Image: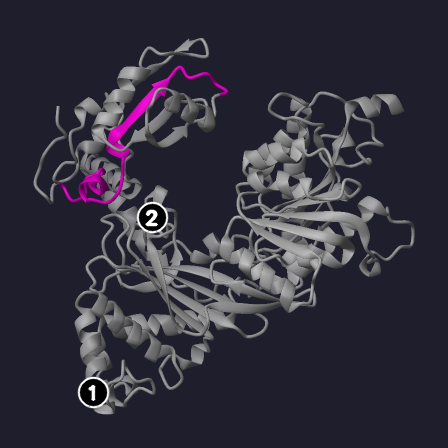
Amino acid sequence: MECSKGSVNSACECWKLKDTGGISEFKSPCSSTNCIYAYIRAGHTSFEQYKIQIENLYRFASTKVVKKLLTSLELKPSKVKIIHKGPCFISFRSSEDRDQAVTKLNGYVFKGLTLKVRTARPAADPALLKRAQEADETNNTPVEKRARIDEMESESSQNPVNPIDLVAPLWRLAYNPDQIQAKQETALSHLAKLRSTVRKVNTFRYCNTCLRTGFMSSKSIRLAEEFCPINRSPVETGYRNKAEFTIGQDGEGKSPVVGCRLGKYCKGSTRVASPSGLPIFSESILNVVCHLQGFLDFISNPETFSDHSFVVSSPTLSLRGTSEKENQTSLKDQALALSRKLLSYDLISRSGHWSSALVRETRMNDRLLRVELHRDNLTDTEISDLQDIIKAWFSPGGPGEAAQLSSLCLSVLSGVSRAPGSFTDNILFGNGTLTELCCGLRFTISMDAFFQVNTPAAEILYNVIKERCLNLFDPPKVGDDAATKTHKIDAVLLDICCGTGTIGLCLAECFESVFGIELVPAAVENARHNAELNGITNAKFLAGRAELLLTDVIRGLAPDKQIVAILDPPRAGVHPGVIEVLRRCSRIRHLIFVACDLAAAIPNFVSLARPPSKKFIGDPFLPTSACCVDLFPQTPNIEVVVVLERLSARDCEKEH
């Protein structure tokens, strides 16, 4: 049975069938422009229509295990997704590959269980699904109830979501003590959950001496504040040195607008709101946004700017070698021609151009703007014309000169997302990098390289990490001043997920040598340059996957050298393969884990703490102490530093 067909403007009926039957009931999206499967018809790369569902898969199956099974059966999946306590979904690149998988897998006995396999319906577009549900609820309610709904929606439109509540949820609380207390309670709650989870997977009860009388040794349900002291941020507002904005349509229908999203797309939200007045952004970043909005207003309707000096007088910048008179004419004509084509990118139809904007700045007064747009139907000539105009706008003598940009980039996407190989960054002026000052060192940062968003608080974070490293080899004595305690340790530091090398270089004076590992090649180039820039000769940085490089790095070290590893992974945690390598490297006795989302990183701690097994070779790492640093005032987020030590149950039993 094929999906219901209707006129282009009719309501989509596909969503009513989305949870019934298999893909045999789905042939293609219906003709409605609001069809929840319209993205399949739009011609964009997606293999959702070639998806299967596997049930009765054994509960400990991982994505890696499933991919290995598929490879052994000579099946070629595009994507594997396992739902926790639910089925497994696998997408293929063609209907032939999908049908072959159903034939081979249905009834196949895997790990003693017979697999049940069937074709599955594609995932629905969240925004269009929400529209369809709301339309159906409205159309099927009594007249009186529908009138009340219309009245509520009218009130909702008059009182839209306040972006400050989404971007800075804690803004109503005084920073000290209210926000600080709330953040510390959150960190302690996550540590208590971490303690409980670790105790479940590793039932051996280590003594207080081994656990250094830290939060793991506490028997109370609620952890006291002493188990996770908090360090406040030196700045409470305007601290972000990096800001990402969406270019879209606001609540009043104006487009294009540079702003903050008013909700997630998966929740059906596509609107944006101006970031003006949001406390986490500096005045200089908001000033850049203001001038970018001015440019978008101009390029969208240049006729309203006919008397603007930017159009009337010749720009300072020559446009591709034209004469002064031709400059004036070409600028206006170029803008008029582009205004008829340039639109905000529509997430639902996946058409349009203006997509997002990135603004980064540093203490050194470097300021970078990257404007991102989708190529869609634009020609190379039109993109070149657009580059000329936006460059003239922000160059000296242009209307956007006051933004004081040191670098300007126009990024052109040929695909749906910013995937490797699907975009081109065109540097219009500047060199596309920034220079920041942190802990007395200068750091060069490339456009996409990671750097902590709150530099003054990052300095506190790095000093806390340094103090924890020193305490591992020289425990503090009563009366010691940790702030002035600095000496070289006869050990090697492994900085895993090192980014531009900030942690490793800030701690280089304390270690005999430093090795940094980072996946992003551009960040590694920055790290090497930063070491040279600051005259640091005992640091080496490598590009690649940590799970592949760690073993070779450790094998090349002198056998008598102690090793301290620092993990500063992305929000979701580190790859499981890295944990396995760390467990196997018995020479690593100490590990410092820097978590920007401790709750999300708990699975990493569980893998580190599991008793030795075929998968997790080597003695486990147990948390011994923790502290937190607030890098994100006005928000619930908190950076937590956890010290872990490799503990042997045998050694603990011998001592006691």
Secondary structure category for the residue under label 1: helix
Based on the picture, tell me whether residue 48 belongs to the magenta stretch.
Answer: yes
Which residue type does callout 2 highlight? Ser
Q: Which mark is residue 269?
A: 2
Q: Is residue 523 visible?
A: yes
Secondary structure category for the residue under label 2: loop
Which residue type does callout 1 highlight? Glu
**In the displayed structure image, the side of residue 627 where residue 525 appears, left or right:** left
Q: CA distance from mark 2 to mark 1?
A: 44 Å
Q: Residue at x 30, y 47 (%)?
A: 152
Q: Position of residue 29 (x, y in %)?
A: 17, 36
Q: Residue at x 33, y 84 (%)?
A: 317
Q: Residue at x 14, y 36 (%)?
A: 30
Q: Position of residue 441 (x, y in %)?
A: 67, 67
- Image quadrant of residue 306? bottom left
**In the displayed structure image, the side of residue 216 where residue 597 appears, left or right:** left
Based on the picture, tell me whether residue 334 belongs to the magenta stretch.
Answer: no
**In the displayed structure image, the side of residue 575 where residue 297 appears, left or right:** left
Question: Which quadrant is home to the C terminus?
Answer: top right
Label count reads: 2
Residue under label 1, please give it: 326
Q: Position of residue 428 (x, y in %)?
A: 37, 73
Q: Nearer the viewer, residue 148 or 599?
A: 599
The part of the chain drawn in magenta is: 32-60
- For the residues bearing labels 2 and 1, Cβ distance under 8 angstroms: no
Q: Position of residue 537 (x, y in %)?
A: 70, 61
